[in-house]
Image: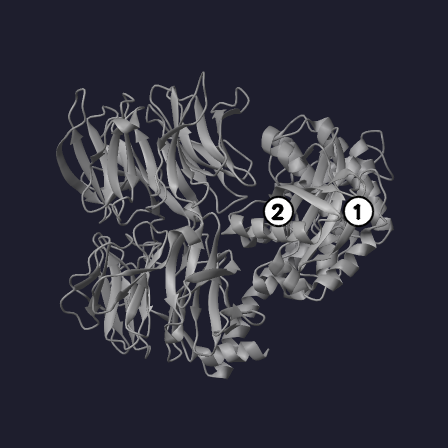
Amino acid sequence: MEGRALTDASSRLSNALADRYTIERELGAGGMATVYLAHDVRHDRKVALKVLRPELSAILGGERFLAEIKTTANLQHPHILSLFDSGEADGLVFYVMPYVEGESLRDRLTRDKQLPVEDAVRIAREVADALDYAHQHGIVHRDIKPENILLHGGHAQVADFGIALAAARSEGGARMTETGMSLGTPHYMSPEQAMGEREITPKADIYALGCVLYEMLTGEPPFTGPTAQAIVARVMTEQPRALTLQRHTIPPHVEAAVQTALEKLPADRFASAAQFAEALEGRGRGDWGTEGRTRSARLGPAVPRSRRPVVARLALAAPWVVAIAAVAALAWSRVRDASRSGATWNYITLGDTTQLLANAPALALSPDGATLVFRQLTLNGRLWVKRRGELNATPIPGTERSTNPVISPDGEWIAFLADGRLRKVRTEGGAVVTLADSASIGGFGGAAWLDDGTLVYVPPSLSSLRRVSAAGGPSTVVLLDSLLGGLGAGMPTPLPGARGVLFQGCSSGCITMGVHVLDLRTGTHKLLFADVAQAWYLPSGHLLYVRRDGVALVAPFDLGRLEVSGTAVPVLEDVLVTNGFAQLAWSASGSLIYMRGGGATAENTVVRVGRSGGAEPIDPSWVGLFSALALSPDGHRMAVGAGASVGGLNVWIKQLERGPFTRLTFGGRDRRPAWSPDGRRVAFVRDTANTSIVVARPVDGSGPDLEMARLDRQVQEVAWSRGGRWLLLRTDNATAGNGDLVGVRTTGDTTPVPLVFSPFTELHPALSPDERWLAYASNESGTFEVYVRPFPNTGGGRWQVSNGGGNSPVWSSSARELFYLDAANRVVAVQVAAGSSFAVTGSRPLFDASNFLVDAFHTSFDVTPDGRSFVFIAPQAPGPLAGTQPIVQVDNWFADMRARLRQ
């Protein structure tokens, strides 16, 4: 849907501006705008035409934004990109700048990682010169970052001057953070910006330029983290690591200049950008003389920053420590205000059960708020019922391997997913009834129980929505996969009167996500919120939704028009969000239960699992936000994808068992690693603006990146054949978004070769070690099954390996076994006969993998070279006492919500 929306916007703009600009193609998209290459008809020149995101235009107010941006039109400087034009056309706010033939600083950093010291200093001085000029004219940029620094002939030009200022001053600037948007970028945001200070001075730009120079010299910004909140916390409380400890060739005066620019207090930074530029030259006033005196000399004997007196460090950090304490005070004030409104907040225990499943939807609350249903985290975990007033919970027989519980509107039944089926059982227990034989395996899928006695659920393909009677019977499609445009559908929740459902639309791997609303009368849907995990309709006429950072908000909702009709207000913090969904449940009576956990920052670990199912961590000290893994051919190293989302995804190398964990890529858009047969390189998918490329990088850093494949659509998975002659790619279909399989030779003719192209979705390509057989998963039968075809002549036959559901095929190194995950999330071992034709001679399940992280879109595990064990990503082991994240119960929560809406 995202690509389609961009096409519609460019088409609208082209028609409205036909007499002035001709749009040629999209160049890229950012948090605030989409940029197009256009031809200026009147002046016969190429220009960059930027269009504000429609939702941002609605928040800011187009006229006010354009009035503010005009204040920057008179900035004329050799290192500032001019503003040619601005206006509004067909409801779209746009502004026009020169088109620079070259690249951005971000592009160069992505390619080179670190710049030569002289290049980095020169670029920083040119940007400082531009900033000083703008500051003298009363303009603060507010969003200095590598993306906004263009390089033409190696020289810097600063773009988007005044855009952030115009956004901040326009009528909706104060509301941006309430809707999940913000001004500035966390990695380069000064402490005062992070704290939301109203008056931002030129010293904020000096701080941001210091961050950019730090990244040019070391390969990454001074402070990084899995979420914006984590980065801001480090910005406010930590000191950046010394530059010369990371790169000894950096001159002392350059490090001293960067340190001064990065001071927490604006008063401790340079008085002007011009002073910063002078310091980078090793000259200037006072202590910045040409005799080589540095800031360290000014402080007396050189003392490493980490060894400064504790009192001094605390004094320096005190304002930001106070800021963090203010967050705790805010939490206390909310509890206090809640008590005034009549709401009560308590931590609850689940009695004699041990752990609650945290990596799949596991909570449901009855309409009267008296019954909590949850899924316990154990092998073959089942559903449990905890009733108000009872100390212990009781299990529900027949609900093994279940996820995604939901309670019927009358409170009598529980629907859930298990073994790839949609089932129901009475809340007091009894016979389990199957409603649909072909449903999602669990986790990302789910079901919504409507008040007309039907359920809308997610089928195994995750690319459509179906509806079935709560009494059973045939199901019907209510949302076609062709309308989703390649997104997966999950987490449906009902609207009253069976008006529609809210659901999450998620890209492959949930790199991008958002909440959509499906109109059950028309079968159409539209995006409501971007970068939001889940949403529910409340009886008050509001939507409750949870962002990926764990902040919950409510916004008024027009049920007739299916549109958000007002400003969102934050109501909860620290809601646990994992794998794209929130652990939260509420009741019509006003009770609310949620797990605390700080948003999408739940870390995981990698475990080795024996053929009998016993699991142990690869390295108990090794945890992170892991999303993919691949064992090296010799089994001694592991490549992992790590990071929270686009902009933070990179590939790392882990030396097994307890060896170092080193970073291989730095671009923030690298994922899904695959090893070369000799173990010397790792290939990975690198996302670009509208497509992907496959890049190979030497593990030891001994050579440049090698582009292996470039297609006209997104690449989602890559596998490297054991003989090294082929790359196997899984793509998003260019039109409908369904996955197809493509082969690319690594030498000679590298033209992509179609392997399996169909109207269905093909996933998880795996080539046998002898390069004779291609295994993959397809939903051509209505549910995903594992198939095998001859290779490379894939049209020469087809054999179905799994029966009743299967995905994620992985070959053993001997090619005598093929492993896959069945519908119950069990690892199944298939014995394969050797010879000129393919034959299955035996099959048996090995162990249940439900307690590991299974990604429906990508292969979720690997097998060791000896075939005796497997590696999976697993939720981080719980502590010895608590066993899980805290669970909070709020009674009379609607009263608390109304009190917040009145503030």
Quick one: 822 or 601, which is closer to the camera? Answer: 822
Counting the numbered discs, the total is 2
Name the residue type under label 1: Phe
Name the residue type under label 2: His
Q: Residue at x 27, y 36 (%)?
A: 809
Indicate which label's residue lies in the foreground, 2 or 1. Answer: 1
From the top left corner, tell me how far across and down residue 432 is, in percent: 16, 64
Q: Residue at x 45, y 16 (%)?
A: 748
Distance between the alpha carbons at the discs numbered 2 and 1: 29 Å
Mark 1 lies on a secondary structure that is loop
Left or right position of 797 against 461? left
Quick one: 320 or 86, which is closer to the camera? Answer: 86
For residue 146, above or below residue 528: above
- Quadrant containing the C terminus is bottom right
Quarter assignment of residue 723: top left
For residue 669, above or below residue 350: above
- Disc 2: which residue: 187
Q: Residue at x 43, y 41 (%)?
A: 732
- Chain-order first, disc 2 or disc 1: 1
Q: Residue at x 73, y 27 (%)?
A: 118
Q: Residues within 10 Å of mark 2 (few under 14, many from 20)?
A: many
Quarter assignment of residue 158: top right
